[in-house]
Amino acid sequence: MKVIKDSVHDHIAVDGVARALLDTPELQRLRRISQLGTVSLVYPSANHSRFEHSLGVYHLACEALEQLGIEGIQADRIKAAAMVHDVGHGPYSHNVEELIQRRTGRYHDDVHDLLADGEIADVLCDHGLEPDRIADLVAGDGEFGQLVSGELDVDRMDYLVRDAHHTGVPYGAIDHGRLVRELRYVDGQLVLGEGNVQTAESLLVARALMNPTVYSHSVARISKAMLRRATEALLDAGGTDARTLAWMDDAELVVALRECEASHPLVRRLDERRLYKRAIWAEIDDVPGGIIEATHDDLVRFEHEIADRADVPVGHVILDVPSRPSMAESTTRVLVNGEVRQLGHQSPLVDALRSAQYAQWRLGVYSPADERDRVGRAAVDVLGLDIDGPLVSDVRDGLYTTLDHFAE
Amino acid sequence: MKVIKDSVHDHIAVDGVARALLDTPELQRLRRISQLGTVSLVYPSANHSRFEHSLGVYHLACEALEQLGIEGIQADRIKAAAMVHDVGHGPYSHNVEELIQRRTGRYHDDVHDLLADGEIADVLCDHGLEPDRIADLVAGDGEFGQLVSGELDVDRMDYLVRDAHHTGVPYGAIDHGRLVRELRYVDGQLVLGEGNVQTAESLLVARALMNPTVYSHSVARISKAMLRRATEALLDAGGTDARTLAWMDDAELVVALRECEASHPLVRRLDERRLYKRAIWAEIDDVPGGIIEATHDDLVRFEHEIADRADVPVGHVILDVPSRPSMAESTTRVLVNGEVRQLGHQSPLVDALRSAQYAQWRLGVYSPADERDRVGRAAVDVLGLDIDGPLVSDVRDGLYTTLDHFAE
Amino acid sequence: MKVIKDSVHDHIAVDGVARALLDTPELQRLRRISQLGTVSLVYPSANHSRFEHSLGVYHLACEALEQLGIEGIQADRIKAAAMVHDVGHGPYSHNVEELIQRRTGRYHDDVHDLLADGEIADVLCDHGLEPDRIADLVAGDGEFGQLVSGELDVDRMDYLVRDAHHTGVPYGAIDHGRLVRELRYVDGQLVLGEGNVQTAESLLVARALMNPTVYSHSVARISKAMLRRATEALLDAGGTDARTLAWMDDAELVVALRECEASHPLVRRLDERRLYKRAIWAEIDDVPGGIIEATHDDLVRFEHEIADRADVPVGHVILDVPSRPSMAESTTRVLVNGEVRQLGHQSPLVDALRSAQYAQWRLGVYSPADERDRVGRAAVDVLGLDIDGPLVSDVRDGLYTTLDHFAE
Amino acid sequence: MKVIKDSVHDHIAVDGVARALLDTPELQRLRRISQLGTVSLVYPSANHSRFEHSLGVYHLACEALEQLGIEGIQADRIKAAAMVHDVGHGPYSHNVEELIQRRTGRYHDDVHDLLADGEIADVLCDHGLEPDRIADLVAGDGEFGQLVSGELDVDRMDYLVRDAHHTGVPYGAIDHGRLVRELRYVDGQLVLGEGNVQTAESLLVARALMNPTVYSHSVARISKAMLRRATEALLDAGGTDARTLAWMDDAELVVALRECEASHPLVRRLDERRLYKRAIWAEIDDVPGGIIEATHDDLVRFEHEIADRADVPVGHVILDVPSRPSMAESTTRVLVNGEVRQLGHQSPLVDALRSAQYAQWRLGVYSPADERDRVGRAAVDVLGLDIDGPLVSDVRDGLYTTLDHFAE
């Protein structure tokens, strides 16, 4: 039994298959993948890695298994899945995931191929575990997949607390001890036990507050868009290919971006924190539905049109259109008077948080600071935005102002 | 300048009038008034005092004043008000306040008489401060009273964080540093600066989660009702009078309750944690409106009727009817695009939290465990409750189960 | 299984005999005994109780038992002992213990009589446990008594962390998780496993830093001496007897002190924090050996002589003579290269900390502020002190200055 | 005024020259230099950067300046120095500093050249500050240099607390608030005010406990030695030159090491955590004095001889000889009875901690696991070690065991 010191969960004991998995190159690589990517440009302390998060998820999985009375081979499967659940992440985690997915067809939680070969496969087989079943759990499939990836998964419990710890933003400080203790299986469904409607709400609220404050902070979104754009330029220039990209660590990607002429200017801006600014920051009601549903090719075409109309280089326009808000947690299940109920049917908060998500949704167009006016006006025309007031609508944005020459 | 070590705010520097106030007997008495009264029967670590809370409120007031650029005599007034804002509390804080108010007409934040005489008055006058103006601030009057008692007051900021620290419940962990930094005065109104809709929401959410988990936990409500009832028996038996009661500290009250035959049985139950149980725990929709608006005399009469019908001693029935839910914070003001707006008009969360308050509201009838069935049935009849299901409706109650022979 | 929320250890699960013990009046009484007595006059947040500490000790005992592989009836005995280890404490914990011991012959950890009768005895017998064996464990006897009371006991691990949490002083923040994990039994001795010399040192250092900063802070010593003196006056005036005193809670003692004419002046001073000041604060080398070894009767005679010579009422002189420094932890045992060694033989720190204890030792003589000069000079003569410099030698005293009219 | 959220100090307000400095590429580069280098191979959460540390040092400097009453241009100089004090660090901070120094003659705190040109110089000049004077402060020169680099500097106060926060090891949790408050200047010397001998000791103790647990943990030393050796191979192979190396960030160095054939095997081992093991771990008394004072060239020669004698490739032997222990903090100055005294003369702890340092000192020889016996025996002969017992003397090593295929 090995014991690892963690700044969030204190001591994490690692044994058996989990310990063997930790020593694989695939897991060790996660030491060099930052958990929150460019969010550290907003919150300077947020330098934590996917590796420590994976340890935390494994730790909470062990506690949940003990609570649920799950033992033996089934427990080993879940522990293994918790430990490897993030090995499919590319460099900078979610920042370039969409790009990798578009070019390779693979999301980070599709690890069937990855677990079928290599050292992880060897370790799993040595411990009598079938790689495919572990990959299914990582994908959230089946009764026990809910523990690893679902509305009540230990993944979210760890990242909320860990991201709060490392950013310094208190909103993610959920009571994970209570959440884990109250997990139950009822008819094959993972639910929270009686008297926990509010426990479930507290998890939703934590996400709802961390989202605009941390994960979708405007500066995080801008820098993430710049990184994605630079990486796309690297691929298009033949600096690397998507499959190679997917297995880089953060260091390899950043050096590759610097060495490629096409991506160099953008990555230098990121290195020196000379970020693009918001030319447009538009509410959902002001954006034509067609824009939100547009394909990637459409978006590229729009960017070209905007650049053309604003008379700026095409690389100076980044169009950032989030998908429509959704709130998966509304299906969190809780026992109420002996019946399994969905939180969305039980709690008025769920609707309110969904409304808040709509109110916080923003389409962004970013450009160098001195071109933002021109780009903004061009984007209104090209995208057919219906904006009365200012082009940058700030209502819910920007909890933490950050260091910037061109403060908005 | 004196520096005091505090477990929440670390170092608190105390100077001038605030330091002189701390040395008065009225302030020192607050060391012996518990902040949360009987809540420590649910959360054993919650033994903090009004004294440390008063220091914390003073500390945050100083930070707010610096942020707002308020100096000189006006700052001294507000600092003094922050320091003394709780000297009007009776023993066990809010637990017996309603009783004291009913018998003396005074609430804890009406301190005009109290500041007019005695050592506090001397200290205020020595520092050129008018006691009446300080008492006005404590009551929340005027432009600057909002800082001491209002939707954005430093009182709430301290108690949420402090109660979270001492109970161990994370929900109160607001970002008080940010809240204080974002305070502004616009046209004489205290508001949060631009970009803080979510900051305001986080304050509301913290209260909305702390409320059922801590302040209105069913065991806290039962024990508070028992303490109030015991104290009423003490007064009725002539063991003390309401004015004397109001200036007792916790120790004096608890000893007086033990020494008086009428209150002895109930206080022994509290001492030994042999608490009454819920015979009724009814949702607001199941309770006739007349009951909720009933006078104290009505409630006493109902209790007698229930005891009579259940054939138990009258002291074995406690009827606990909270007032209708309200949500004062909905009028929190925030700057949005340069305009002052009320949070209730800006945030869908406010309505949702109000709905949650309604869903969480419960009328309670408490009795010894072995009589609860009889008492419950009698109460349904006497109060005209319209209950289909179980008499104790648990949907949102009881985040933390606690130690109890007669677990429900 | 019941789960209790604790501000230090988060969730504490309580079951079996431990849960039944919690519901006894003897345990519930500990809710009303403050852990640190008058230390809250120095650190206002330090209002924690023996009850929450007992829960914490029980929690760490459970973790240690799991680590050590101790199960069954032996584990139940140790869990019960951990839970009840402090039921023998009088009001204000250690503050009046010496007085109670002098008059009843009993120290707080001698609980044989106490466990032989009453509800605790019933609970123990119901669970097949012999009260005498539990009392032996509380006294630290036998192989397993070391876990409850010894150099590596879980009592100390909890109180250091808990006192740090509640005072805000960081020095007690030991790594209790590691300490518990590294416990081993070797030849019937409780030791720390290989590679833990420094772990053991860290425990010593925490005590060595918490001692002068918290436990022996001069203001804590003065107020403790005043409380002890007031209580002695109460006993001498027949206000109560020592056996009754031993079972009071804090509230009963403080009210009794207020109601007795002989103790009233001193307890009012404590209530209003108008404390005596140091007339003498003398280093060990300046104090004749005979004084340090003097009997209680001798000390009383010295006080009378000092008062007489200074021409002040005898109650205005308190002589406070600590016993010679000792460092029990020097016998902490650690495995080094497979051998059990005593820390005192292994670590140069032990000698240094012992020297520090000598340097910090102070004899105190306390009196009202305006009589301190007279009292100080009289004490020098009566006690034969050999002081060159100032009568109050401050070298290592008073980490935290506190609020005081008569600041020294 | 900009406010930055920090996980250690909460909110850090940045203004004037400090804010302008933050936007320079030199400061932004520190985001990509890890504070503790390879320590994250022992403590997975320790991924913090020199950038957040620089913000923390700046924050504490501001607090110290306010406490000391230093204002105007002198305060600006010190704030600027605090902010830039680490810009001279190479990649992986101290891990390759010795190597850079050997080849360029420059240590990380010699920033005269660096501040003379470039954007930092521009910013300093814009704010009327002379680069040379700022560089002097960074080097610790002059009365005010002590604040930035000295026994009581704010650098150490930040890193102890920050490293404790991020590793999870509690020992570094000093009371920085008190330390900063007690700073005084007496006759041009920075001292701690009266009554702070123990405060000074607590700082020493924190370092003394963090050192073997974190900074000199054997696995941290092994991995650091491997990184240094790999980097040396990179330089020798012409993969880069020392001046270029000095301005790389962590990403550039690690990619360069992977791309160079000479360094590739070692950096792969680091990437996959297949670390060398200790063949020798010898106490200071067992090592001939000549070895400790040996030149770099001598050490290289010894390594060759050991490899030769053990019949392993020369790259498979790393000799790691720390310099003799010193304890700079012994000259920390504290006011005692009005006189400035050195802590080393005042506190018996200083000698004890120095003895502990000697006891903890270890010479290391590292090699692949399967060659360690051969290498160990060869090293004993070549170095003339006088070892009776095992070649790896573990007395004080390895507080936290870590994940490792070849666990020792």
Image (tube, coloured by chain):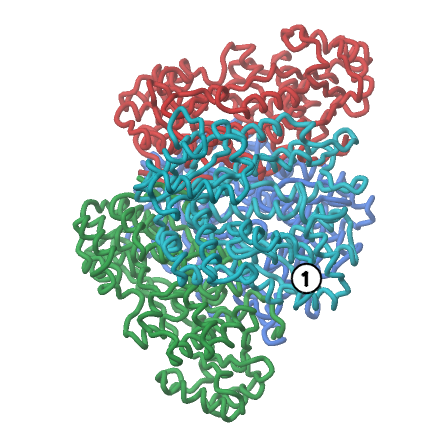
Chain colours: A red, B cyan, C green, D blue
According to the picture, the residue beneath numbered tag 1 turns out to be B115
How many labels were placed on the picture?
1
Q: Is residue D13 visible?
A: yes
Near-viewer residue (C68 or C39): C39
- Crowding at mark 1 (Cα within 10 Å: few <14, some 14-19, many 20+): many
Q: Is residue D308 visible?
A: no
Lateral position of residue C55 relative to residue A50, left or right: left
Which of the image's four quarters has the N terminus of chain D?
top right
Q: Is residue A326 above or below residue D327?
A: above
Lateral position of residue C32 relative to residue D201, left or right: left
Near-viewer residue (D38 or B198): B198
- Name the amino acid type tagged 1: Leu
Q: Position of residue A386 (x, y in %)?
A: 77, 13
Q: Position of residue C245 (x, y in %)?
A: 35, 70
Q: Position of residue C146 (x, y in %)?
A: 26, 58
* Residue at figure coordinates x 55%, y 77% from the top left: C277
Q: Quadrant of residue B385?
A: top left
Lateral position of residue A15 relative to residue A241, left or right: left
Q: Quadrant of residue A139?
A: top left
Q: Is residue C172 above or below residue A24?
A: below
Looking at the rendered structure, the secondary structure element under dot 1 is helix
Which of the image's four quarters has the C terminus of chain D?
top left
Q: Position of residue C370 (x, y in %)?
A: 60, 82
* Residue at figure coordinates x 75%, y 33% from the top left: B335
Chain at tag 1: B
